[in-house]
Amino acid sequence: MKRTNVRHHKLIAAACCGALALGATACGSNSSTSGSTGSGTAAASDTAQLGGTINGAGATFPQPVYSEWANQYKKASGTTVNYQGIGSGGGIAQFTEGTVDFGASDAAMTDEEEAAAKKKGAPVHVPTVLGAVTVAYKVDGVDKGLKLDGATVADIFLGQITKWNDPAIAALNSGASLPSTDITVCHRSDESGTTKNFTAFLADYSPAWKNGPGVDKSVKWPTGTGAKGNDGVAGCVKQNDGSVGYVEQAYALQNNFTTAAIKNASGQFVEPTLEATAAAGEGAKPPADLRFSTINAPGASTYPISAVTFLLVYQDMCKAGMKADQAKRVKGWLDYALGDGQQIATQLQYAPLPAGIKSSAQAEVDALQCNGSAIA
């Protein structure tokens, strides 16, 4: 697999560590803090030292990049962002219950989830970045990326392929010396958008998966060991010989994992590079509400398990129960995410939004209100 340079590895490691620290920060404080002007001049001028604290929770998939954004946004605005990576299901639940200022999910809310959230107002999906869901593994003697297709990956996670030298894996990797090591499957135990995206990919290639475990943020796994969060699955892979799991690219890089090249819809085996992840977003045509997926996106150079991740807010935050100054802080955070944050994303191996999707997302943010009035 193509690697990033040393500076990017250090930034990814720092962001992942920062994400853990950020998630452990106690929520609820609204004390004003100050900070020096950050490198993003647009963000600094727009936020104009807002101070205070905003609280969010949800997906672990984007936690490394959200952690770094929080660091930079505090420098630009003085506002502290407390973000807890609890999984997409938890993020949607806390957003719906109104216990956080914003939620986060790697999968768009379902119609049922939106209906529940609408009791407080109209929910808005703000796409932020795209990331690769890697198939990462730890197998002695296999130090280069294997080639895998959707049907084979599904059979591994169904427990039907149990050895690394299984004929189905060998057929995709002619000439490779594969050991007879037992396969240990690592999967999420919490409600996860990463799981929903990964299982959507499996269901597209495996009728047995589609009609069995199915596609959801939480499924009944036929085999394997469950762990909480992307970091938990990464830990499971790291600790077990012969293991395989699905983790976001930043976590794979932080742990120096070997990752598989996955066969895409065009029949090409593609590694989870930044360029291949970005390609998944280029052809996307989201609906007006921006609830969309890039799993199995078309294109010969596209990595097929590339996913878009969302921040969740209410269209009128004040009518949903937020104070005016808090709504302004949240809007400033979203403006930063779609502005200077896009350049930071690439340093952590997340793909920025394509121009058209970014423009649509910014229009949604610009239209946010407080008691029927635009947020200045």
Image: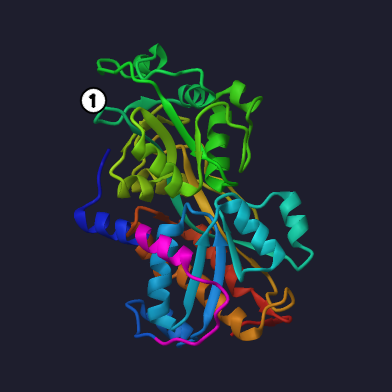
Residue at the image position 29 percent from the left and 60 percent from the top:
11
User: Along the horizontal axis of the image, is 96 left or right of 340?
Assistant: right
In magenta stretch: residue 27: yes
- Report how many numbered discs are placed on residues in the image: 1
Instruction: Name the image quarter holding the C terminus.
Output: bottom right
Give the structural element (helix, strand or loop) at label 1: loop
Residue at (25, 15) in percent of width and height: 175
Asked whether 106 falls inside the magenta stretch, the response is no
Q: Position of residue 5 (x, y in %)?
A: 21, 52
Q: Can you see residue 26?
A: yes
Are there few (<14), some (14-19), or many (20+) residues within 10 Å of tag 1? few
Q: Determine whether, in the image, residue 112 is placed left or right of residue 274.
A: right
Q: Is residue 213 above or below residue 36?
A: above
Kindly identify the residue that appears in the image at 26 percent across and 26 percent down. Answer: 142
What are the residue bounds of the magenta stretch? 16-34
Up the image or down, 196 lies above or below 25; here it is above
From this view, report whether residue 317 is shown above or below residue 144. below
Color theme of the render: rainbow
- Residue bearing the label numbered 1: 141
Residue 23 x, y percent position in the rendering? 47, 63
Image location of residue 308, percent across then percent down: 51, 51
Query: Does residue 297 appear in the picture of this structure?
Result: no
- For this rendering, which residue is in front, 219 or 169? 219
Asked where in the image residue 78 lies, by quadrant, the reply is bottom left
Outermost residue, left side? 6
Hey, what amino acid is under mark 1? Gly
Taking 343 as reference, is 360 left or right?
right
Report the residue at 52% width, 64% height from top.
Answer: 359
The N terminus lies in quadrant: top left
Question: Toward the viewer: 229 or 5?
Answer: 229
